[in-house]
Image: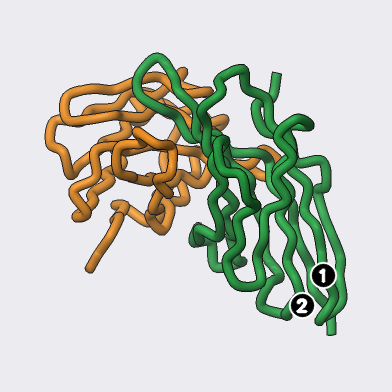
């Protein structure tokens, strides 16, 4: 079974609009971390935001916020006031304990296209 | 500050050839990872290491071997390359994740084509 599920292969939004990228995860461990990364067309991986499983408040970083719904095992990324430069692939990832330390597992990604 | 450096950036191999991808990090990170990225599949973990001299299998380890002889280096080997191993390979590193809050820093990727 997939550990991280991103159900939206592609999303389209206009500049200045808000957009939500979906992410659900599967783990039985009470301790885990959730991450979002951005990959522009140039290929580099850029860390955006982190949410810990014990965090009471939703994480925010500038225009990025993470809508964390623990009971639903959901960690959606919200981008407010989209910009053309937000066009990229976005990956949700989870760090959980494994046989050797912890492993960082990624979803399949969502391609976001922002138009003017 | 170099961060995570992957060598080479591009490579074309013939089926059956072997090669080693090198990942070097200068951040004194304990954890290092190798991923492959294929269209529609996201990043899939191949192998990872939680410290010098240790390695562990990830989601898709078959056909690959790794070694972590020095803390700063993590090598990914393909003993007998197959066309199915055509992919973009990413290396990443992070601090120990005792509290899970440790982002991974990525290299620029290696584009490997097996013909």
| Residue drawn where x is 73% and y is 80% of the image | A84
- Residues packed near mark 1 inside 10 Å, few (<14), some (14 to 19) or many (20 plus): some
Residue A68 picture location, percent across and down: 70, 45
Left of B100 or right of it: where is A115?
right
The residue closer to the viewer here, B34 or A19, is A19
The residue closer to the viewer here, B45 or A4, is A4
Q: Chain of mark 2?
A: A
Looking at the image, can residue B37 be seen? no
Left of B69 or right of it: where is B77?
right
Q: Quadrant of the C terminus of chain A?
A: bottom right
- Relative height, residue A56 to residue A40 (above, below): above
Residue B45 picture location, percent across and down: 49, 31
Give the residue number, with chain letter if any, for mark 1.
Answer: A18
Q: Chain of mark 1?
A: A
Quarter of the image holding residue B72? Answer: top left
Name the colour assigned to chain A in the rendering. green
Residue A1 picture location, percent across and down: 70, 18
| Residue drawn where x is 31% and y is 52% of the image | B6
Name the colour assigned to chain B in the rendering. orange
User: Which residue sits furthest left?
Assistant: B70
Q: Are circles 2 and 1 on residues that touch, CB within 8 Å?
A: yes
The residue closer to the viewer here, A11 or A80, is A80
Left of A64 or right of it: where is B45?
left
Residue A80 picture location, percent across and down: 75, 71
- Relative height, residue A66 to residue A25 (above, below): below
Q: Is disc 2 placed on a helix, strand or loop? A: loop
- Relative height, residue B4 to residue A103 (above, below): below
In this rendering, the count of numbered labels is 2
Looking at the image, can residue A19 be seen? yes
Q: Is disc 1 placed on a helix, strand or loop? A: loop
């Amino acid at each position: 079974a997939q550990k991280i599920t991103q159900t939206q292969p592609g999303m389209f939004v206009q500049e200045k609009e808000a957009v939500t990228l979906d992410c659900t995860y599967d783990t039985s461990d009470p301790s885990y971390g959730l991450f979002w990364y951005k990959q522009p067309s140039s290929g580099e991986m850029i860390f955006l935001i982190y949410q810990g499983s014990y965090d009471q408040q939703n994480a925010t970083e500038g225009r990025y916020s993470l809508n964390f719904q623990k009971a639903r095992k959901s960690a959606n990324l919200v981008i407010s006031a989209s910009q053309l430069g937000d066009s990229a692939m976005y990956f949700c990832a989870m760090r959980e304990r494994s046989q050797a330390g912890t492993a960082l597992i990624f979803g399949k990604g969502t391609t976001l296209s922002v138009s003017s | 500050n170099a961060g995570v450096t992957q060598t080479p950036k591009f490579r074309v191999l013939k089926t059956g050839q072997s090669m080693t991808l090198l990942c070097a990090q200068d951040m004194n990170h304990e954890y290092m990872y190798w991923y492959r990225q294929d269209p529609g599949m996201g990043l899939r973990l191949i192998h990872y290491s939680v410290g010098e001299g240790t390695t562990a299998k990830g989601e898709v380890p078959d056909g690959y071997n790794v070694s972590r002889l020095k803390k700063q280096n993590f090598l990914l080997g393909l003993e007998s390359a197959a066309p199915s191993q055509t992919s973009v390979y990413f290396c990443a590193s992070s601090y120990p994740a005792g509290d899970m809050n440790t982002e991974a820093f990525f290299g620029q990727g290696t584009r490997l084509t097996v013909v």
